[in-house]
Image (spheres, coloured by chain):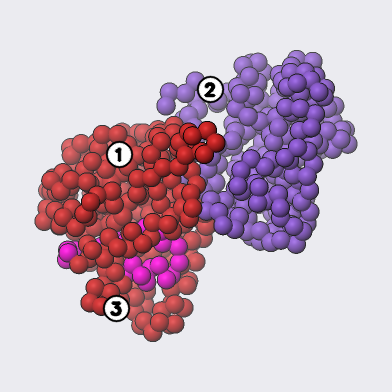
């Protein structure tokens, strides 16, 4: 067994590093930059039932140690993704493929999830109940225990693949939401999505991003994400994918210590195209330094300390 | 796209708030004029996309205007400074479409720089080229001599008439018999060029996340679908472009 190997719901990952949804397209776009097969998994661009343009530009703004985005789930729709994008990425990549699913009603989540459940290329279904950049739906499903449970239950009823619920940090207490997902049958939890944030041009007083408020990510949010992974890991038994501001091997080790079985790298992919390979190469060096034999051994070690 | 470290060879002010920086490093991924680079600036999170003015055998020139924090920091960089740069981004101009046509290269403000290598490539292709360079004022004008040295007929326009024709690049275009253009500049300029009905290629600007096509931060609507300015663009054919957006 490789020292970096980990697993999610019985599915083996060659290492814990997964590019996060929305920061890696459908994966094949990066194939001419580096060999994708080094990656533990890939979480694909968030997909909805119908094609979406997303929000008007500007969709991006910078802030201290991070950025704000309001892409608004631009995607070509599930039918196109299953027919055209999945075969393209599967031809280039032999690791774990995660479909990232969004909807505007429970029924829509189920329809998109079923389409990916039937697609042989997909290993895990990641249900995004936490997008802050769309009106009606998105985050609304992830900020209420009953709604999060309802989406989980409905998707689980109609699908066979592991279902991971991607949660929003924009809640008073993340724990009851994660518990509601677990009770409704979720196989795992991905957290966190972006924090709702804002940047204003000091000269004009005008918000920079077209939607005014938008999703804040990057190294600045790492302590919040880490805290939430820790809290949820203390409260649920299902595996967790940790995400939020990860940009180096030390960050991966912190998140896994807090209870994550794998991690996703998001914003850092946008400023450093070699983010994931750099982290994967750095991991064994850091593990040697800290006396860690296998990365799996440290999952949740901070919970007992 | 390639990533590498580039050395600042020179960095000087050439017009009001406008700087020319020369860099040395790998230029092998630059295949067409109109492509851009994305520069990591210490202390700032996002890279800064800047179009390439000229490149040749491991050397490249960029021209940028100080408009904010990033370009402000850049303007103070000294010779010998090493920069982390993503090179060879975007599609660039397809100059082969200009073959056998009377071509204009049209730049507005900091849209002027990428038109330099575009003009140079067109000349090398055997085209006769007219450059139309638009600036706000005489003080903001730059590179007029450089275009003339290429052997290009150069027309200058300024908003206030302090240099060349008083008016916009479209007023300059009217004085020529060009039937095809390559253009880069602010959106209102591109819009009015598009309205002339003359066909050509337009290079757009937008706030970007990654600059290499994975975040969908700079998507625009075109007549041929949703396009990422950074990867599918920044250059689009006038026949693909619409300024009538739904979103």
Start-end of magenta stretch: A235-256
Q: CA distance from mark 3 to mark 1?
A: 37 Å
2 and 3 marks on the same chain: no
Instruction: Give the colour in which the image draws chain A.
Output: red
Q: Is residue A23 magenta?
A: no
Q: Which residue is mark 2?
A: B243
Chain that bears disc 1 = A
Instruction: Give the colour in which the image draws chain B.
Output: purple
Name the one closer to the observer, A57 or B166.
Answer: B166
Q: CA distance from mark 2 to mark 3?
A: 56 Å
Q: Which residue is mark 3?
A: A297
| Relative image position of residue B89 (x, y in whole percent) | 60, 47
Mark 3 crowdedness (10 Å alpha carbons): few <14, some 14-19, many ≥20: some
Answer left or right for A8 relative to A274.
left
Q: Residue at x 52, y 33 (%)?
A: A204
| Relative image position of residue B68 (x, y in whole percent) | 61, 43
**Is disc 2 in contact with disc 3, using a CB cutoff of under 8 Å?**
no
Chain that bears disc 2 = B
Examine the rendered structure and indicate whether residue B181 appears above or below residue B230: above
Q: Residue at x 24, y 49 (%)?
A: A171
| Relative image position of residue A11 (x, y in whole percent) | 26, 65
Mark sitting earlier along the chain (3/1)? 1
Q: Which residue is mark 1?
A: A48
Q: Secondary structure at mark 1?
A: loop
3 and 1 marks on the same chain: yes
Quarter-of-image position of residue A296: bottom left
Q: Is residue A246 magenta?
A: yes
């Amino acid at each position: 067994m490789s020292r970096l190997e980990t697993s999610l719901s019985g599915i083996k990952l060659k290492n814990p590093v997964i590019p996060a949804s929305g920061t890696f397209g459908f994966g094949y776009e990066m194939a001419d930059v580096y060999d994708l097969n080094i990656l533990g998994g890939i979480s694909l661009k968030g997909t909805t039932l119908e094609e979406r343009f997303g929000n008007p530009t500007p969709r991006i703004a910078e802030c201290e140690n991070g950025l704000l985005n309001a892409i608004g789930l631009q995607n070509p729709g599930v039918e196109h993704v299953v027919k055209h994008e999945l075969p393209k990425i599967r031809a280039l990549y032999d690791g774990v493929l995660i479909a990232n699913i969004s909807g505007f009603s429970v029924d829509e989540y189920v329809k998109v999830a079923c389409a990916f459940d039937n697609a042989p290329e997909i290993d895990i279904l990641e249900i995004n109940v936490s997008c802050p950049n769309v009106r009606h739906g998105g985050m609304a499903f992830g900020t209420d225990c009953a709604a999060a449970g309802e989406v989980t239950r409905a998707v689980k009823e109609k699908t066979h693949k592991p279902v991971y619920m991607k949660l929003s940090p924009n809640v008073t207490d993340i724990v009851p939401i994660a518990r509601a997902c677990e009770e409704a049958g979720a196989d795992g939890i991905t957290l966190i999505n972006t924090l709702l944030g804002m940047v204003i041009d000091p000269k004009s007083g005008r918000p920079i991003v077209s939607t005014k408020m938008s999703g804040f990510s990057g190294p600045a949010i790492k302590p919040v994400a880490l805290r939430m992974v820790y809290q949820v890991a203390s409260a649920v038994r299902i595996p967790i994918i940790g995400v939020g501001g990860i940009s180096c091997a030390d960050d991966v080790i912190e998140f896994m210590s807090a209870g994550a079985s794998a991690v996703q790298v998001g914003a850092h992919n946008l400023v450093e195209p070699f983010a994931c390979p750099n982290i994967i190469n750095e991991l064994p060096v850091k593990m040697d330094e800290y006396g860690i034999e296998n990365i799996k051994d440290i999952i949740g070690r901070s919970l007992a300390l | 796209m390639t990533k590498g470290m580039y050395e600042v060879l020179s960095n000087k002010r050439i017009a009001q708030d406008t700087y020319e920086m020369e860099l040395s490093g790998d230029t092998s991924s630059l295949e067409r004029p109109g492509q851009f680079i994305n520069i990591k600036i210490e202390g700032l999170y996002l890279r800064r996309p800047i179009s390439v003015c000229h490149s040749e055998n491991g050397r490249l020139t960029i021209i940028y205007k100080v408009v904010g924090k990033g370009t402000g920091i850049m303007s103070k960089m000294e010779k010998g400074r090493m920069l982390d740069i993503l090179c060879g981004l975007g599609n660039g101009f397809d100059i082969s479409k200009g073959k056998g046509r009377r071509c204009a290269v049209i730049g507005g403000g900091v849209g002027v720089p990428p038109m330099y290598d575009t003009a140079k490539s067109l000349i090398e292709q055997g085209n006769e080229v007219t450059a139309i360079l638009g600036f706000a004022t005489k003080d903001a004008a730059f590179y007029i001599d450089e275009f003339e040295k290429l052997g290009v007929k150069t027309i200058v326009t300024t908003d206030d008439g302090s240099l060349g024709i008083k008016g916009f690049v479209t007023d300059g275009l009217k004085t020529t018999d060009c039937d095809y253009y390559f253009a880069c500049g602010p959106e209102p300029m591109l819009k009015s060029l598009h309205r002339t009905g003359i066909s050509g290629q337009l290079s757009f600007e937008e706030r970007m996340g990654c600059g290499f096509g994975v975040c969908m931060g700079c998507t625009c609507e075109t007549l041929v679908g949703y396009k990422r300015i950074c990867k599918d663009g920044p250059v689009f054919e006038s026949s693909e472009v619409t300024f009538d957006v739904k979103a």
